[in-house]
């Protein structure tokens, strides 16, 4: 048995990202039609930004410092899931602000577009092209 970790295909990053981005649209438009109680105005809806902030920190602070895709990929998924959670906050917890939370969720997932993951898959030929 080899102790080498298995490589994560680059397409996996895109498939996860696309599924999560498309999934929130489906969930939002299906779940928004569910009858809920009257929305209660609460100043605690500001707490809904915590997952977005944590997601942004993962994307812009933590992942750029990682050089191994086997470590970055799970963080990528956790960050997207935190951003996706905003949709659920909006629909179930803070229905008065559901549109805001949905849009923030779209932006939060969009920031994880996996163009950055290409750096994990550079070949020696890629390096020599620009020298």
Image (cartoon, rainbow, N blue to C red):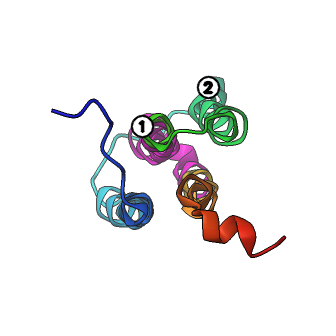
Mark 2 sits on what residue? 47
Of residue 120 and residue 107, the one placed in the foreground of this image is: 120
Q: Nearer the viewer, residue 108 or 7?
A: 7
Q: Quadrant of residue 116?
A: bottom right
Find residue 22 and report its image quarter.
bottom left
The magenta-colored residue range is: 76-103
Residue 45 painted magenta: no
Outermost residue, left side = 1
For image coordinates 32% across by 35% down, the residue present is 4
**CB atoms of marks 2 and 1 within 8 Å:** no
Q: Residues within 10 Å of mark 2 (few under 14, many from 20)?
A: few
Task: Tell me how far mark 2 sits from mark 1, CA to CA.
Answer: 24 Å
Magenta portion: prevailing SS class: helix
Residue 75's spot in the image, x, y percent? 49, 36
Locate residue 91, reporting x and y percent.
42, 46
The quadrant of the picture occupied by the C terminus is: bottom right
**Whether residue 49 is situated above or below residue 102 in the rendered picture:** above
Q: Which mark is residue 74?
A: 1
Q: Earlier in the sequence, mark 2 or mark 1?
A: 2
Q: In front here: 126 or 9? A: 126
Residue at 27 percent of width and 29 percent of height:
3
Q: Secondary structure at mark 1?
A: helix
Q: Nearer the viewer, residue 99 or 126?
A: 126
Q: Is residue 94 magenta?
A: yes
Q: Is residue 39 left or right of residue 61?
A: left
């Amino acid at each position: 048995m080899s102790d080498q970790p298995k490589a994560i295909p680059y397409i996996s990053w895109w498939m996860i990202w696309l599924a999560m981005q498309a999934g929130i649209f489906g969930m939002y438009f299906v779940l928004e039609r569910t009858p809920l109680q009257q929305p209660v105005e609460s100043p605690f809806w500001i707490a809904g930004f915590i997952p977005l902030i944590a997601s942004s920190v993962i994307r812009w602070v933590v992942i750029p410092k990682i050089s191994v895709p086997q470590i970055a990929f799970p963080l990528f998924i956790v960050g997207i899931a935190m951003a996706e959670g905003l949709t659920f906050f909006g629909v179930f917890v803070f229905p008065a602000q559901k549109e805001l939370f949905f849009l923030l969720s779209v932006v939060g997932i969009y920031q994880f577009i996996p163009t950055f993951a290409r750096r994990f898959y550079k070949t020696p030929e890629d390096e020599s092209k620009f020298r």
